[in-house]
Image (spheres, grey):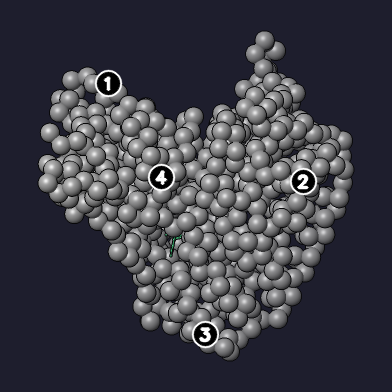
């Protein structure tokens, strides 16, 4: 019998011998490589250990994690940063379920990602006969993914991978599940037939041009506005139409507001940025041009007190069903952002009427007032250090190093950092996103460090860090340039809550007091810092960036600082009820 060997080696086998063979393992790897996917984020185990080994042997980068959810988050953010689907590999059943959380989050956030999981044999799963890690993974994945496929025959691997890639990146990007039963990986076929079965995906995310009428309607509405506003979302950052978006903002002269992951698409210190007057412009504007942003909970569903004066919306989005999802959209422009913004630019030409001077003046005045107020708060140096004085340091360090990627999660740590730290380059701020979840921290930090090869600063609440903290070992193992700053106030929201019964157990929101998170990274050969003043924090950050190696800074924050649920008090049923 012919030996099972990979296709590359097969080329050197003399023709007179029995036909050279390939198998499912090789075909899966070759199919991804053929499509330029060269990194796997995953966690090996039955039945995919050899897949991970072989992938590395065949030149793919394999980043191995301690928990599949973090691997999945790394893959998802890799997809967001590169426009290529990030690949996550897991074992069956529990490993798959761990990865599924990240896949669902990727789908929710419109990040392209493929979760590949090994699975048990169909025959046993379908008759529920009790297999090792038995689970009907395909059906479980379906509602949480943009698409889900299973491959049963080796000759279909090429098509299966092609479908997964196309589904992940075309139209509105999202998460795709690819189910690979263990038996498939061991199937063999001739190397020649295998090679022919693979598919190089052509134009995986085709441009989608908006209709000329929709562009005209949008421009007419924009021209009629007295108090226009442009709102940029992370779809705009993903689209990589940076120059066109900047040209549209600048040529129109309209104030703009970036959603949190769109910060830096134009530098946050741009004169037209209305971030410091956010509530004012949302309430007072009359026409709002949404580019790659949904009117979901993060924007109060486009209605209510937040939005104040009556509005008319223009919405640029690739997904036609996003239009009218919360409020009526007067001028939908459906297509890819690059094409839509180019068409809008062409339509407005060189002579777009400047917005009303009174509107620009009102926005400018509100901005100055709020910036002054914030400057006064940030100038204080309370003892112990609080969120603001610590974030002032991070703001300055990011300003001095604008190409660092900032990962940010927590409650208060997230809310304050988002408004205090200015971003200067696109796609450099990665955070809790559409679900507002905790646990993305180390996965995103690793994905960003691997994909960009540049410094990452992960600004973490102590509670948020706990969800993925074990990945500091992964960060150390691959010597990634990640500096983690843990804002340590001894608990969820703050560390001062008490057990109302006075029993032995502490309150459910309280952690071990004075915890030394810096020791955690030292256990794996990274560098730890323990700081309690802005000056110490600044020194540690500057050393970390100069070092470009794994660092964890345990930043001690006043344990009484921090509000319940951060800025989401209204979503906390008890607090909301008390307010009524
Ligand atoms: P944010 O949270 O920043 O407000 P959302 O995730 O809510 O942003 O919205 C992103 C939107 O961008 C989604 O509705 C998605 O369909 C859209 N989108 C993503 N990529 C593109 C693209 N290339 N072209 C057009 N729209 C896109």
Q: Residues within 10 Å of mark 3 (few under 14, many from 20)?
A: some
Q: Earlier in the sequence, mark 4 or mark 2?
A: 4
- State how far apart marks 1 and 2 are (Cα): 50 Å
Q: Residues within 10 Å of mark 1 (few under 14, many from 20)?
A: few
Determine the image quadrant of residue 178.
top left
Q: Residue at x 87, y 46 (%)?
A: 380
**Label 3 beta carbon within 8 A of ligand 1:** no
Q: Residues within 10 Å of mark 4 (few under 14, many from 20)?
A: some
Q: Residue at x 71, y 55 (%)?
A: 401
Q: Residue at x 65, y 13 (%)?
A: 505
CB atoms at circles 3 and 2 under 8 Å apart?
no
**Which image quarter is the N terminus in?**
top left
Against 128, residue 482 (above or below) is: below
SS assignment at label 1: loop
Against 432, residue 260 (above or below) is: below
Q: Residues within 10 Å of mark 2 (few under 14, many from 20)?
A: few
Q: Which mark is residue 60?
A: 4
Q: Residue beneath label 3, please?
A: 348
Q: Whole-percent x and y of residue 216?
A: 43, 83
SS assignment at label 4: loop
Q: Earlier in the sequence, mark 3 or mark 2?
A: 3
Q: Earlier in the sequence, mark 3 or mark 1?
A: 1
Q: Residue beneath label 2, please?
A: 542
Q: Which mark is residue 132?
A: 1
Q: Whole-percent x and y of residue 45?
A: 37, 27
Against 395, residue 570 (above or below) is: above
Q: Residue at x 50, y 69 (%)?
A: 241
């Amino acid at each position: 019998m012919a030996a099972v060997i990979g296709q590359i080696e097969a080329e050197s086998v003399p023709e007179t011998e029995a036909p050279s063979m390939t198998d499912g393992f090789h075909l899966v790897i070759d199919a991804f490589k053929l499509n330029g996917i060269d990194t796997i984020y995953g966690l090996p185990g039955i039945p995919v250990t050899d897949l991970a080994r072989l992938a590395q042997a065949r030149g793919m980068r394999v980043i191995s994690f301690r928990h599949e959810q973090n691997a999945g988050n790394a893959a998802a953010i890799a997809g967001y940063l590169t426009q290529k689907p990030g690949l996550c590999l897991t074992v069956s059943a529990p490993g798959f379920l761990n990865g599924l959380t990240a896949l669902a989050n990727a789908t929710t956030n419109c990040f392209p990602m493929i979760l590949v999981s090994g699975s048990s044999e169909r025959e046993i799963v379908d008759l529920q006969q009790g297999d090792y890690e038995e689970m009907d993974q395909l059906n479980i994945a379906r509602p949480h993914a943009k698409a889900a496929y299973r491959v049963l025959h080796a000759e279909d691997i090429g098509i299966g991978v092609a479908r997964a890639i196309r589904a992940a990146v075309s139209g509105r990007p999202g998460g795709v599940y690819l189910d690979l039963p263990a038996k498939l990986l061991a199937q063999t076929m001739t190397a020649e037939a295998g090679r022919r079965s693979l598919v190089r995906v052509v134009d995986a995310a085709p441009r989608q041009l908006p209709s000329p009428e929709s562009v005209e309607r949008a421009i007419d509405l924009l021209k009629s506005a007295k108090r226009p506003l442009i709102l940029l979302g992370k779809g705009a950052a993903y689209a990589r139409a940076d120059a066109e978006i900047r040209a549209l903002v600048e040529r129109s002269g309209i104030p703009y507001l970036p959603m949190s992951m769109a910060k830096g698409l134009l530098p946050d210190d741009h004169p037209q940025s209305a971030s410091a007057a956010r509530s004012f412009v949302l309430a007072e504007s009359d026409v709002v041009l949404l580019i790659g942003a949904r009117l979901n909970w993060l924007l109060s569903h486009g209605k209510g007190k937040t939005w104040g004066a009556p509005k008319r919306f223009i919405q640029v989005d690739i997904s036609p069903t996003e239009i009218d999802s919360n409020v009526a959209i007067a001028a939908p422009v459906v297509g890819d952002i690059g094409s839509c913004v180019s068409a809008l630019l062409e339509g407005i030409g060189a002579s777009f009427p400047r917005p009303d001077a009174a509107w620009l003046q009102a926005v400018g005045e509100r901005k100055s007032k709020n910036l002054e107020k914030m400057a006064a708060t940030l100038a204080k140096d309370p003892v112990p250090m609080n969120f603001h004085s610590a974030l002032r340091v991070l703001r300055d360090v990011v300003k001095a190093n604008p190409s660092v990627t900032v990962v940010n999660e927590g409650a208060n740590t997230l809310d304050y950092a988002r408004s205090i730290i200015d971003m200067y380059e696109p796609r450099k701020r990665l955070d809790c996103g559409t679900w507002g979840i905790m646990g993305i921290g180390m996965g995103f930090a690793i994905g960003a460090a691997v994909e960009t090869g540049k410094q990452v600063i992960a600004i973490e609440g102590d509670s948020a860090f706990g969800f993925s903290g074990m990945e500091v070992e992964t960060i150390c193992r691959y010597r990634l340039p990640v500096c983690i700053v843990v804002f340590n106030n001894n608990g969820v929201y703050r560390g001062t809550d008490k057990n109302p019964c006075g029993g032995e157990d502490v309150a459910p929101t309280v952690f071990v007091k004075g915890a030394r998170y810096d020791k955690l990274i030292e256990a794996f050969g990274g560098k730890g810092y323990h700081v309690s003043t802005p000056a110490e924090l600044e020194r540690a950050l500057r050393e970390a960036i100069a070092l470009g190696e794994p660092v964890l800074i345990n930043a001690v924050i006043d344990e009484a600082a921090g509000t319940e649920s951060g800025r989401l008090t209204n979503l906390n049923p008890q607090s909301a009820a008390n307010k009524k």
